[in-house]
Image (cartoon, grey):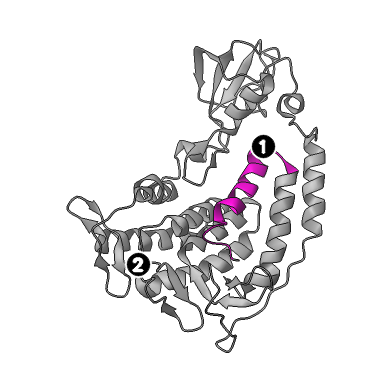
Amino acid sequence: AGIGAGVDSYYEYLVKGSILLENPALMATFLEGKAAVDRYLKRDDWYVWVSMTKGQLTLPVFQSLEAYWPGLLSLFGSTTEALRVLYSYQTVWRQYGFLPEFFNIPTGEAGTNRENYPLRPELIESVMYLYRATSDPFLLELGENILESIEHSAKTACGYATIRDVNNHQQDDRMESFFLAETTKYLYLLFDTNNFIHNDGRTSSIVKTDELHGECVLGAGGYIFNTEAHPIDPMALRCCEAKHTNIFSNNVQQRGQIFRSSRKNNGQKKGRKMTVSTDLSMDEAISTRDGFTHSERRETASQVAENVDKSTGSINKDESVAQTEGP
C-alpha cells in the first residue's frame, strides 16, 4: 500500500469530488484514508510502501507518481505540511535534474531499473497548486529549474524525449502524451498568473438559460482539474444541476466586472458578491442528492477533520525490507 501507482487518482478524486460536488462524505473518506497514510506510510516528510494487511515496511522508496500529494494537501488548506513534503521531493529533482520513477530514500539513489523519467507532471502540478496557495517565490524558482532541465536535456528536434536514465540524461525515443496534456499545462499556469483559470471571481459570463427563467454565471473561477488536467467549471455544473439540464440559449453576455447580485436589484452597487439570478436560492440550486445544506456540509467536514489521528515515524537504513512485497 502507498500513495502512488494504483491509488493516486482515487485519493485525488475524493478531495476534488468533495469540493466540486460539495459532498462531505467524499472528504470524510479521504480524511479517514489520510489518517491511515500518516500512521503507517509517513516517515518524516516522505511516504513509503507498506504491507496492506500488516502495515509493515516493504519498500522504502519515493515513487515519482507520489509527487501529486503536496498539491492535493494544499487543496484543503494543509499548505505547511504540503511545503515540507514538496521540499523533500524537490531535493531529488535537484540531485538528478529529473525525478526517477523510484528513489531509494535510505540510500539516496535512483531505483535499479527505475532510473527513467517519462516527463511526468506530478511535481510541477504540486508546485503550481502551492504557488497559487502561498505565492512563495521559492516555488517560482523551482518551476524555473524544472523548465530549464526539460529544455536542456529532454528537448529534441521534433519534440521532447523521455529520459531513459536520470544519472546520465540519456534520452529514449518516446514522448508520452501526458507531457503535452499536463506537464506543459501546469508549467504554463505556474508562470501565467493572469490566466483565466486563476480567475478569482472578478470576471465571468452571464448565460441565458432556456429553462431556469433567468441566468447562469459561468467562467467565474474555481476550476477543478480532473486527473488528466482537464479543467471543470463548477458554476457550469451548478447551473446544469439546478434544473437537471445543460441546454443553454446562445445569448451570452460578456461582462468585465463583478456582476450585480440580481437584475432585480438595479440600485445596488457593483462589487457585491454575485449570485445566480434565478427563482431558486443558491442553496436550493446546488443542493445535492444527500440533502445536506452548505452549513451542514462544512460542519460535517470539520467534525471529521477534528477526529483525524495523525502520527508519524522516521525512516532509517536498518528497517527491514520484504523483497516479495511492493507496489
Q: Residue furthest front?
A: 324
Vertical side of 282 occupied by 194: above or below: below
> Where is residue 290 shown, x and y percent of the image?
78, 35
Helix, strand or loop at label 1? It is helix
User: Which residue sits at x=44%, y=50%?
Assistant: 190
Q: In the displayed structure, does residue 172 sit left or right of residue 251?
A: left
Q: Main secondary structure of the magenta part?
A: helix
The span from disc 2 to disc 1 (Cα, nearest Å) is 37 Å
Q: Residues within 10 Å of mark 2 (few under 14, many from 20)?
A: many
Foreground residue, 269 or 309? 309
Check residue 116 in the rendering and tell me which mark sits there, or answer none: 2
User: Which residue sits at x=64%, y=12%?
Assistant: 214
Magenta-tinted stretch: 2-24
Residue on which the image places disc 1 = 21
User: Which residue sits at x=23%, y=58%?
Assistant: 173
Q: In the displayed structure, does residue 316 sit left or right of residue 177?
A: right
Helix, strand or loop at label 2? It is loop
> Where is residue 107 shown, x and y percent of the image?
47, 84
Q: Amino acid at mark 1?
A: Leu
Which quadrant of the figure has residue 241?
A: top right
Vertical side of 6 occupied by 249: above or below: above
Q: Are marks 2 and 1 in contact (CB under 8 Å)?
A: no
Query: How many dots with numbers?
Result: 2
Vertical side of 209 occupied by 223: above or below: below
Which quarter of the image is occupied by the N terminus? Answer: bottom right
> Where is residue 162 shown, x and y percent of the image?
30, 60
Closest to the camera, between mark 2 and mark 1, is 2
User: Which residue sits at x=42%, y=75%?
Assistant: 111
Q: Amino acid at mark 2?
A: Asn
Q: Residue furthest left?
A: 157
> Where is residue 304 shown, x and y percent of the image?
79, 53
